[in-house]
Amino acid sequence: MDTGLVERAQGGDEEAFGLLAVPLGDRLFAVATRILRDDDLAADATQRALVSIWRDLPQLRDVARFDAWSYRLLVRACYAERRDERRWSPSLRVLRTAHDAGATDEMALLIDRDQLERAARRLSIDHRVVVVLCYYLDLPHVQIADLLGIPVGTVRSRLRYALKGLRAALEADARPATSEAVQ
Amino acid sequence: MTVERDLERAVRAWVAQGSEQLPDQSLDAALREISITPQRRAGWLARRFRIMDSNRLRFGVAAVAVIAAGVIGGSFLAGNVGGPGPTPTPAPLQSLVTIASGSFTAPLLASGVTVVDIDAVGVEPRLRGSGSRSATPASGSMEVSDADGRFSVEVECTRWAEELLIGGEVTDSTHDEAPVGTRVVIAFHPRTVIKALLWFEDSPPAATCSAFLESISIPIGVSNLAMEPVDGLMRVGTYVADCDGTGCTAIEY
């Protein structure tokens, strides 16, 4: 992060913010798309976050904390986007059958991703946020707590719950395949 | 412990995948909005109110009240004098089309669910479908099973949309992922092959099966759902249909 650009943008320099926004937009979008599991929603959330960052930038006291602060605004935007979503969000996929048992590794990989995707969709956004911040951004629990404004214990419990939920969903997914294979 | 680590590894691998580049149009839109958005100066409001004396404050409050009364009164009159205003256009429901846009790859058809060539010699048709081609009321039922009859799904409240038969609520099923009560979409081109059996999770759930089907109905001439094999994978995407009195042709993927 170029702190010089941040400081110039803080002073109202739109050109500096434009330079900042290109890499920042990509970073935020990557996180948003993993939280929301929908590229269109993620693009909207990122757009919303970029505008909030610009608007509130003069209020940021420590420019060294710009990244963490930006992620905080992004997470808020993701919540807002989810809240505003008044549309159908069907999950569309082809159902598996016993034929899948003889699938190639590549196919198995596709199915694993699909299973994880479905399992993740069953998690609440609170839990998905923590999973993405922890496993995608590799942020320490303390920093996640600070970013979300929640106690560290809550971060840990959300993470534990999320992993438990993912495991349960994956196990539930595995059951039909096993029973079909036995038949 | 190993199981936990495996799960964490799988989660890490999974979150590593995904889009990483904000679409240009979104960035452009954000920058356009920024160009007309003033920044919030820290403590700006507090300072302004501190320097405002009580008379100016009272005048300011009165002015705001007058403006607000004018705006409210104006909108009230506009709503009554001219008769009922235009009916607000309901927000369009998110259709299956938008959700499936972009490239969506599903498992190979060959190892997929329901590749049954109904007309093939020696292959017993495993699909029975009936339904009205008229859009409303949605009616009909169908039963689908794979070539070996390993599972079957019966749905009711089906309907036709162009060349796609779209399913509804599952009334009987031996498929674990499409249990009774869930909603599925079963699409095929009549007299050819079943293209796909798709599972749907409508959230929030539609009030009725008909409402569910309406939400995925496809108006003529607009984007449509399409499935086609691409490089051995089934690609689900959208197309724009060119429709005349006899039918529709996909003109653009």
Image: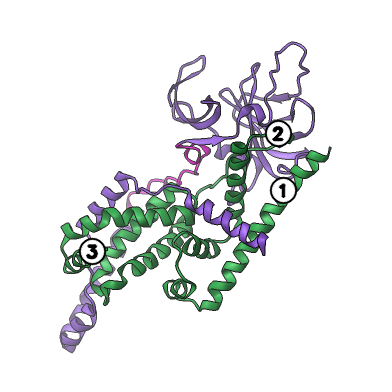
Question: Mark 3 or mark 1, which has the lower sequence index?
Answer: 3
Q: Do discs 3 and 1 belong to a common subunit?
A: yes
Of all chains in the rendering, the one displayed in green is: A
Rounded to the nearest angstrom, the CA distance separating label 2 from label 3 is: 52 Å
Query: Picture coordinates of residue B139 (x, y %)?
Result: 68, 31
Asked if residue A159 is positioned above or below residue B17 in the image, the reply reads below
Query: Picture coordinates of residue B209 (x, y %)?
Result: 66, 41
- State the residue at coordinates (51%, 40%): B95
Chain B color in figure: purple
Residue on which the image places disc 3: A2
Rounded to the nearest angstrom, the CA distance separating label 1 from label 2 is: 15 Å
Residue on which the image places disc 2: A102
Segment colored magenta: B81-102
The quadrant of the image that shows the C terminus of chain B is top left
Residue on which the image places disc 1: A174
Q: Is residue B208 magenta?
A: no
Label 3 Cα neighbours within 10 Å, binned few <14 / some 14-19 / many ≥20: few
